Amino acid sequence: TACSSKYVLSQMHPMWQGPLVVPGGDHQSPIDIAVRKTVFDSELKPLVTSYDPETCQQIWNNGYSFLVEYDDTTNKNTLKGGPLRDEFRLCQFHFHWGETNDWGSEHTVDRRLFPAELHLVHWNSDRYSLFEEAVMEKNGLAVIGIFLKVGKRHEGLQKLVDALPSIRHKDSVVEFRRFDPGCLLPSNIDDYWTYHGSLTTPPLTESVTWIVMKQHIEVSHDQLAVFRSLLFTSAEEDVQKSMVNNFRVQQPLQGRTVRSSFT
Ligand SMILES: COc1ccc(C[C@H]2SC(=O)NC2=O)c(OC)c1
Ligand SMILES: [Zn+2]
């Protein structure tokens, strides 16, 4: 689908620090969410999600993370409400994780790192007709960020974990059907932080309304270990590199305000 955004990542080192000066960017992501500096906004509405598992298409390794992609040619997977004025359409979700459980998330909360972070990527289908158009526009994307903690096994995640060995190498893809992304949401999606930022990999465009959930989800140690069995490298390459630490470091807030939907 369009959203697979076969973006060519510059020869990005896993601990890619990015250029010191980002071209034309002072609203970059991820950031540290300093809770004491967030501002409660009573105008923020509850988030409304509606996902159809039948639109799930494939899971693939793009050499940076693994993506589960949805058919985004119709309006079957929608996100609205929260800080959003328009209706957005899910196109994919993916994760970021570390080589150990001590780090791996992109956003931090009061400098606290989580072992992994889930991103559900949506594009503004009220204003644009393709993901690729939306990704270049200021109000083009909405990404829900959900922290993962190591604890009890996540039953819904297991179907995805079981598919990972079949996409070990970069550019491998397999059919992946009837997966409900809603099963990955925490029980409480009314408490979140929101701010305007960017993609966390090239092209780093500042087109994202970030919605970071306060409540994390739990996955087991063994489930997360399977993420780390993926490889950055393609089958042809003679040196195989484990897909770990595929996160960007936190970027300066540059005067932005992070709003909270809760007190
Ligand atoms: C050209 O379009 C792109 C390029 C990169 C990403 C992936 C980035 S953005 C994020 O939140 N996490 C990531 O790893 C993308 O995703 C929407 C869209
Ligand atoms: Zn991401």
Image: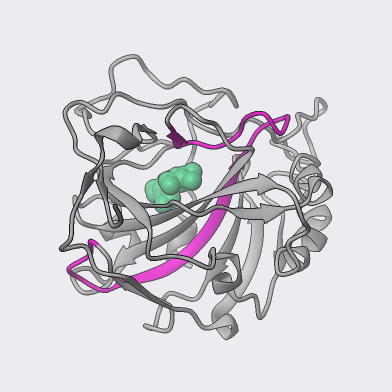
Query: Which scheme is used to colour this image of the protein?
Result: one colour
Q: How many labels does the image show?
A: 0
Q: Residue furthest top?
A: 20
Kindly indicate the quadrant of the structure image that contains residue 98. Answer: top right
Kindly indicate the quadrant of the structure image that contains residue 86. Answer: bottom left
Q: In this view, does 24 lie above or below 235?
A: above
- Residue 48, image x, y percentages: 35, 75
Q: Is residue 7 visible?
A: no
Q: Residue at x 71, y 34 (%)?
A: 101
In the rendered view, does 126 fall on the left or right side of 17? left
Q: Nearer the viewer, residue 61 or 258?
A: 258
Q: In this view, does 208 lie above or below 253?
A: below
For residue 142: magenta?
Answer: no
For residue 84: magenta?
Answer: yes
In the rendered view, does 20 fall on the left or right side of 9? left
Residue interval drawn in magenta: 83-109
- Residue 209, image x, y percentages: 28, 52
Q: Is residue 182 above or below residue 35?
A: below
Q: Nearer the viewer, residue 58 or 83?
A: 83
- Residue 121, image x, y percentages: 43, 59
Q: Is residue 262 visible?
A: yes
Q: Residue at x 55, y 32 (%)?
A: 113
- Residue 80, image x, y percentages: 29, 73
Q: Which residue is drawn at 50% across and 54% down?
A: 215
